Amino acid sequence: MLHHLAIQNTYDIFEMALFQDNTLIDYLSEDKRHTSKLFIPMLDQLCTKNNIAFANLDFCAVNAGPGPFSTLRSVIASVNGLHMATSVPLISIDGLNATFTEFYDDHYEYTVILLNAFNNEVYYLIAHKNQIISKGYKNIHLLLQEIVQEYENQSIHFLGNGVILYDNLIKEIYTDNELIKINVMSMCSIKTIGDLGLRMFLNKEVISSEYLMPLHLKKFTF
């Protein structure tokens, strides 16, 4: 029997869930603005209520991004500190991949996931059937133009909070296009983060004995 923790932020909240094997047994969430202040008290509450110490967990799965950088940095700094103190293994989960895994619909030839990267930019994932073919970040107008040109007359499943944000723009470009589905699901669930972490742990995939780094995607120039 394994016990593990899953943690992520969803642009609006940060959340953590305790799992026994693949069963979510307890969950807490809070406004993302309080991540730094409440991370440790919430973790203590979750562990105390379920009579388990963080140091006795088998691993901790973390949505390492991409996402809002300040909250993401707070989450990752917190789990890195806990890892330093306890040596509990950390498993980095790619949030774009996790969202694709949770909401993939094989009725559509292509899947496009868009997460808000702010300033008219998005983090994106494009997949053909169940194969991811590209990821990155780009101006939403340029990205949509490229998608229209590259995948003309192909069925496309759009999802992610960037799709909600730029819903009108997408509908303007794909006027009366019955091949397009716009999914209002904003991003992956904490359950998916926990499930993917468990699968990776059992398969001995990407288990970190070191510290996590945020999957921010953006490249800064000076």
Image: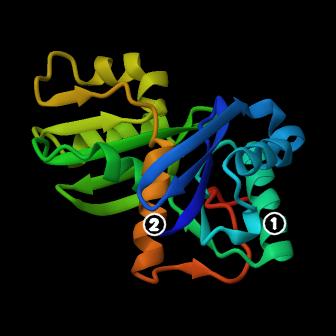
Against 91, residue 64 (above or below) is above
User: Residue 154 location, x and y as percent?
Assistant: 12, 41
Mark 1 vs 2, N-terminal side: 1
Amino acid type, mark 1: Leu
> Judging from the image, what secondary structure is the residue with disc 1 in?
helix
**Residue 56's quadrant in the figure?**
bottom right
User: Residue 53 location, x and y as percent?
Assistant: 75, 62
Choose between 42 and 35: the one closer to the eye.
42
For image coordinates 13% across by 38% down, the residue present is: 155
**Residue 167's quadrant in the figure?**
top left
**Is residue 69 shown left or right of residue 77?**
left
- Crowd rating for badge 2 (residues with CA inside 10 Å; few <14, some 14–19, many 20+): many
For image coordinates 50% across by 60% down, the residue present is: 94
Number of marks drawn: 2
Any part of residue 157 in sight: yes
What label sits on residue 82 in the rendered view?
1
For image coordinates 81% across by 60% down, the residue present is: 77
User: Residue 164 location, x and y as percent?
Assistant: 44, 23
- Crowd rating for badge 1 (residues with CA inside 10 Å; few <14, some 14–19, many 20+): some
Any part of residue 136 in sight: no
Choose between 147 and 112: the one closer to the eye.
112
User: Residue 206 location, x and y as percent?
Assistant: 52, 79
From the image, tell me which residue sits under label 2: 198
For image coordinates 64% across by 40% down, the residue present is: 15
Amino acid type, mark 2: Leu
